[in-house]
Amino acid sequence: MASNISSGSVPHLPGMEVTELSKNTYEVYIGPAHPGSGHMRIIVEVDGDVMVRVDPDIGFVHRTMEKLAEGRDWIKNIPLFERMAILDACNITLPYVEAVERLLGTEPPDRARYLRTLLCEINRIASHLYGMGIFGVFLGHSTLYMWAFGDREVFIDLAEQMTGARLTHSYPVFGGVRRDIPDDFPENARKATKYMRNRLNEYAKIFLNNPNIRSRLENVGIMSKNLATELGIVGPNLRASGVRYDVRLNEPYEAYGDVEFEIPVFEEGDSLARAWARVEEIRQSLNIIEQAVDWLEKHPRENFMHEKFWKTAPKLYKDVFSGQIDYAGKYRVKLMPLFASLKVPPGKAFARVEAGRGEMVYYVESDGEDVPYRVRVVSPSFRNVIAFKYLMPGHRLMDLPAIYGSFDYFPPEWDR
Amino acid sequence: MVGGEKKLISIQDSLKNVLKDNIISIEQAKGYIDVLVPTDKLVDSAKKLKEFGFDHVKSVTAVDYIAKKQFKITYHISSYLNEELSKYIIGLSTIINRDDPHLPSLSKIWVSAEFQEREVYEFFGIIFDDHPDLRLLLLTPVVAALKPLRKDFVVKEESDNIEVDYAAYNATKWW
Amino acid sequence: MPAKVALKRNPKKNPLGRVFSGNIGALAVGLKYFFDPNRITLLYPHEYIKLRQGYRGYIILIQEKCISCSSCARICPARAMKMLSVKVFDKRLKKEMVKKFPVINYNRCIFCGYCVDVCPTEALYHVPYHDLVYMNMQDMILSLEDFQKEPEDVTAKEGLPIKYIFDEKKGLVKVKYEEEKKEVVQPQQSQQQKENPQSKQVDKGGVS
Amino acid sequence: MNVWYLIYRVIIDDIIFYPPIYQFLIIPGLIAALIVALIIIWFERKAAAFVQMRYGPREIAPKIGGAIQLVADLTRYALQEIIIPETVDVLPYLLSPIIMIILALLPLEAVPITSIRTYYPIPPDYSLLIAVALSTLSPLFIIIMSWASNNKFAVVGGVRESFIITAYELIAVLGFLSVAAMTQSFNLVQIVNLQMSGKWFGLLNPIALLVVFIAVLMSTSGFPFEIPDSESELVAGPYTEYTGLLYGLNMGGAYIKRWVFSILITIVFLGGWAPYRPTPGIITGYFIPSLIISIKALIVMAIMSFLRSVYGRYRVDQALGIAWEILIPLTLVAFGLGLAEAYFGII
């Protein structure tokens, strides 16, 4: 394999790549141990202060999840895939669950759909705040970093009340979810959304409308509509370039067809638009959370799992749910022992959802065994990384953090 | 969902119109439409599909059918700019021989396939002809030489045995 | 009511206004928080969060309830739980017999809670704390006896229990945790258990 | 007894309060600078923490809010192993941080901090010009440092440093000289005496003060404006290859430069030792004015430190654009304003 890599008379060692540089340029290695970027390296060829060639060198946290998934039972893959992006855990695993549900031929009941939507939006806000915080570090704005991470705590706390874990929720399972929301959750969620709306205005004041930051972001890394389409960019980055694509809009899943919200689309396509797109998305997510909470409050606490299961469940399961057993948590949905040795009918399924950073795609193939035959995972960061190669050349070296940060790139998600 | 079914049939028809005799088989899988084309007509079909409006690649998936000695490569494509087409995902697939795996690269037609093809190349050892920059992406050369996602590369995992031997457990306290 | 597209633009401002209002706005927000700070930091070892019931913390086995079905070990994604064959005295059948009970390896456990949720008799439960320290990795593999004991919450001995409550203006507000009205019986079983681990009563599981 | 008294007088008068020693080493020199660094770094962290929903330094001495955190940090820097990479040019690599610190303090030797004639370190006739000229020396050694480090990041950082210094030192110098144009004098004592009536030049000519303030922020590369060593693309800029105490010296060097400039700003724009009128005698004529200046300079530095929590980092070409396109014209406006005020006799 190695012999294919380089050609010509350049000396070559295994594991080492040698490229000749043109005159008057030199190479700078940004990463892999880098404050903020996580574990990746960008090899930049610089002519003076202008980047001429950018080569994202990734894979520092690669874990071969696609291979590991082929050796694990169907349900055990959910906690595995969650580890791609623990800050966006529900969104990351949801398409896998959906794909397997398509193979199994089950549909989650309404309450489960709303619960999933609720957690997805909480995760989306947490994920955007995380991205904005890192963006702040890149631009030397430590206040945004601390604010974003501090306010993210509010939503992590909400998720913890809902699922029992701060980050690795493992919340959706085939045919339903694992818990219902606690009694005081709607009130807390409403307080949190109100708080966050006010905070977003302050974020705009101290960061996005700050002339210092604006001049760093405006007209930097402009990605036209056509270029974004060509490169297959996803998520808020795509919508910041004026493409009207969002899985929640084009193929509504879970409860997204029933709640009312807007998809913010920006025309400019520069780093500032990408940052604003995230802020606007947080605003819409807050709307969705409020609507989902209202719906959940109005409707009775039943049908959180597939109907068949709920009817045949033994009495203990209902006791646990209603909190009759005092040492166990309330509103927990017991799993069937069947899940441990689930066999999925043969077939191929493809599912997509709009995760925090963009479209998350799973291709699942089953041959009727208790493990998947093939799981293909394409995460949003994976499809965004190509933009660095095509977008950065021509910009100054100091624009690298501004572009990199605006894409909200998350190495563990891409490396899988 | 009745309307949806009808639309699916119509998109299948229009795919047949676009690709004409390139299609070996067309099948409604769960969540996408699987279109199988012969390897030598892959580039031609891709060009036609791009003209039709499918402007980006979502995923390049290779599946190793070791029993049949085949690889199946699927380009899951869809559209951003065409709102009607964006509701569908087309799996443009082709089957290649497992012994000498190579197929024409589509990354000149869809730039979004470039990194994904590099990934398939390193994990399966499938060579994409005419790829602009076919290098390793995630793995080191030593690991990539093992072609880790092929089915004949078996991951050594710890035992699946759910029971632990009492004597051994007391002696070593480890598993 | 599906989603709809809302076309937006970056807020535009004329250059002069941008410089003045932008700078003044940023400085004003900064000064506001300088004089009225909104702190959410937890001073961890001095304070600790009293987590609510339902938090997926350490897992405890109630041996009396276990029916040895092995579901927990089979569903464990991290292979942290294994079944151990032990000779026990069965009360119902009144004879000694070999039964399988789960033991856990906290080196591997990822606290997903699948085992607790899959248990058909609710013989496993979570305690709402997770910050324990082990001196070596061997200690993290629990024996059957240890697995039935609630581990000692060390932070609770020194730290001040704290609860975060949601607030519209400050997001999360740190308040001192107060026991709820419902009197929670603190089980005084740790001594008793050491002497006679098999005799644990099921009904004693009244723990917060 | 007389002998002991004589020795005591010699130590006090001729050693401690001998102006070159006193100003270079005690107040506002090295020792005061260290204490100021202690206070300012603590304040900077605390202020940032207040804005950023945190507590800031606390664990070391929680009762006084972690105020001696810097002592702990310094101890750590001092005890850390100093690693000298094989590829560096050893002599300039080792010497330049030390020379930089000394040169950074050197302008204080030219600044009179009292109006009593006996306590001038040098004749003050051209003291403003000399102080400003000396202040431009130390950045040279940052450039030498980066070149001696033999590291790509360091070289890029050094180039940026030289760009920034060229642009912003010029602005700082011009800003200070606009006051000289107002007063038709380079004599700092005379400049302060003119402000005794409460008409501080910072109030009379706010544009010059603003311009100098921004120039000092930028040229001393304090936290959010540290373009030469911006950590998100250049690891630590010119200081990439430095470890331990040498790195600590570099970090301290930036604060010392800022401190020296703050003292100059205090004297030129904020009235120096005004409203206090020094009278002969060591304490009343020398010690108290130096304290007043130090406290005023401390406030200037605190304001600079607070900006850390509001602003981010400019791009290098934007920073230069601001310098050459906006601030230089502004400086000329300040110059004109100063001349106009002098012409109409407002001073």
Image (cartoon, coloured by chain):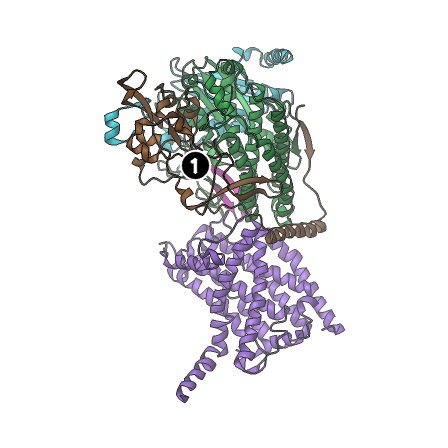
Chain colours: A green, B cyan, C brown, D purple
Determine the main secondary structure of the stretch shown in magenta.
Answer: strand
Magenta-tinted stretch: A43-59
Q: Quadrant of residue C193?
A: top left
Q: Is residue A48 magenta?
A: yes
Image label count: 1
The answer to whether residue A392 shows anywhere in this view is: no
Question: Which residue lies at the image location 63% right of the left edge and 51% below the top edge?
Answer: C32
Q: Is residue D304 magenta?
A: no
Residue farthest to the bottom, as pictured:
D2
Q: Taking A282 as reference, is D155 above or below it?
A: below
Q: Quadrant of the N terminus of chain A?
A: top left
Mark 1 closeness class: few <14, some 14–19, many ≥20 residues within 10 Å: many
Q: Quadrant of the C terminus of chain A?
A: top left
The amino acid pointed to by label 1 is Tyr
Q: Nearer the viewer, residue A286 or C115?
A: C115
Label 1 secondary element: loop
* Residue A205 in picture, x, y percent from top left: 65, 46
**Front position in the image: A182 or D208:** A182
Residue designated by label 1:
C129
Vertical placement of residue A204 versus A377, above or below: below
Classify residue C186 as left or right of residue A389. left
Residue at 51% x, 10% y is B24
The correct choice, above or below, for D145 with respect to C107 in the image is below
